[in-house]
Amino acid sequence: MATQPSIHHVLAILAGDLDAPTDSVAHLIARLGWRGLTPDTLDGRGDHEVAPCFVRVTFPGITPTDAFIVDVATAAGLRVESLAEGSAAPSRWLLVGPQSRSDVSSAVAHLRAAHRIHAVPFRKIEDR
């Protein structure tokens, strides 16, 4: 059985906590009993695959207006299709149109570096 700290650590990583050490994810997955899973190496496979995604953006202070959020995200290179309020007050969810993983990663890195916006992309899972 997984310990409480292990579960909380995995949840922190999934929530996009940048302070959570990610080198122990495989170890935690093994402790949780998911032996068939392996971490994604991000070796370029599917990097050019174009797909829609969600990006959760969290702001360090007062949350700006929705129009400003869309403008900043668009200027960073995201193809924002819509915006929704997050469960926590300073966060919003962006639905991003089909883009490659590398383009989304570059835009997220720009938002973090230039604006101190904590941005975490999530793949959109569609019915197949």
Image (spheres, rainbow, N blue to C red):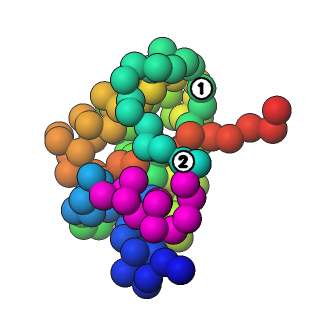
Q: Are marks 2 and 1 in contact (CB under 8 Å)?
A: no
Q: Is residue 19 magenta?
A: no
**Residue lying farthest bottom?**
4
Distance (Cα) linking label 2 and label 1: 23 Å
Q: Position of residue 125 (x, y in %)?
A: 68, 41
Label 2 element class: loop
Q: Which residue is mark 2?
A: 37
Can residue 57 be seen here? The reply is no
Provide the major secondary structure of the magenta segment.
helix
Q: Nearer the viewer, residue 51 or 6?
A: 6
Q: Nearer the viewer, residue 89 or 51?
A: 51
Q: Which residues are magenta?
A: 24-35
Q: Which residue is mark 1?
A: 51
Q: Left of 110 or right of it: where is 82?
A: right
* Type of amino acid at the residue the image marks with label 1: Ala
Q: Residue at x 23, y 45 (%)?
A: 112
The answer to whether 69 is drawn above or below residue 108 in the figure is below
**Residue lying farthest left?**
113
Q: Position of residue 104 (x, y in %)?
A: 41, 30
Label 1 element class: strand
